[in-house]
Image: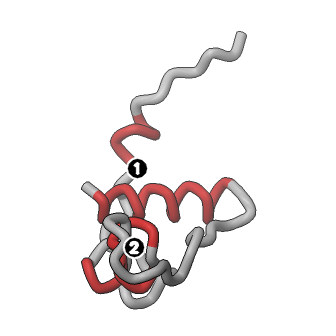
Amino acid sequence: FLRDWSDAQRSIYAGQADGWYFWSFKIEEGSPNIPYWSYFESLKAGYFSKDPSKLFNPDVCKPWIANTTSTAA
């Protein structure tokens, strides 16, 4: 789930906004949130690819984008 989530966030923000950034690179030792809030630990856990510009699944958002409905009049 977290790998797809990170791919989806990076895909959408890189393509439809001004880019993306990770909130923190490293947090203090002993925190229970280390794998989720530390970029380096997220990398170790496999949530991000070694090259941050590469996605594991570039089509991660395709099922939702293809099935959206317009609310425009």
> Mark 2 packing: few (<14 Cα in 10 Å), some, or many (20+)?
some
Numbered label tally: 2
Estimate the spatial distance between the alpha carbons at disc 1 and disc 2, rounded to whole Å: 12 Å
In which quadrant of the rendered view does residue 58 lie? bottom left
Write down the residue under mark 2. 55
Q: Residue 2, image x and y in percent?
A: 30, 60
Write down the residue under mark 1. 61
Query: Helix, strand or loop at disc 1?
Result: loop
In which quadrant of the rendered view does residue 7 lie? bottom left
Query: Helix, strand or loop at disc 2?
Result: loop
In which quadrant of the rendered view does residue 1 lie? bottom left
Q: On the picture, is 35 further left or further right than 66?
A: left
Pick whichever, 9 or 64, lies toward us: 9
Instruction: Tell me the number on the disc at residue 25.
Output: none
Residue occupying the point 74% across, 63% down? 18
- Which mark sits nearer the N-terminus, 1 or 2? 2
Check the image and name the residue furthest to the bottom: 50
- Vertical order, 46 against 66 (above or below): below
- Vertical order, 41 against 16 (above or below): below
Q: Residue 53, image x and y in percent?
A: 51, 81
- The C terminus lies in quadrant: top right
Residue occupying the point 45% across, 68% down? 37
Q: Residue 32, image x and y in percent?
A: 32, 66
- Vertical order, 26 against 57 (above or below): below
Pick whichever, 27 or 52, lies toward us: 27
Q: Residue 54, image x and y in percent?
A: 44, 80
Q: Amino acid at mark 1?
A: Cys
Residue occupying the point 33% across, 72% down? 35
Check the image and name the residue furthest to the top: 73
Q: Amino acid at mark 2?
A: Leu
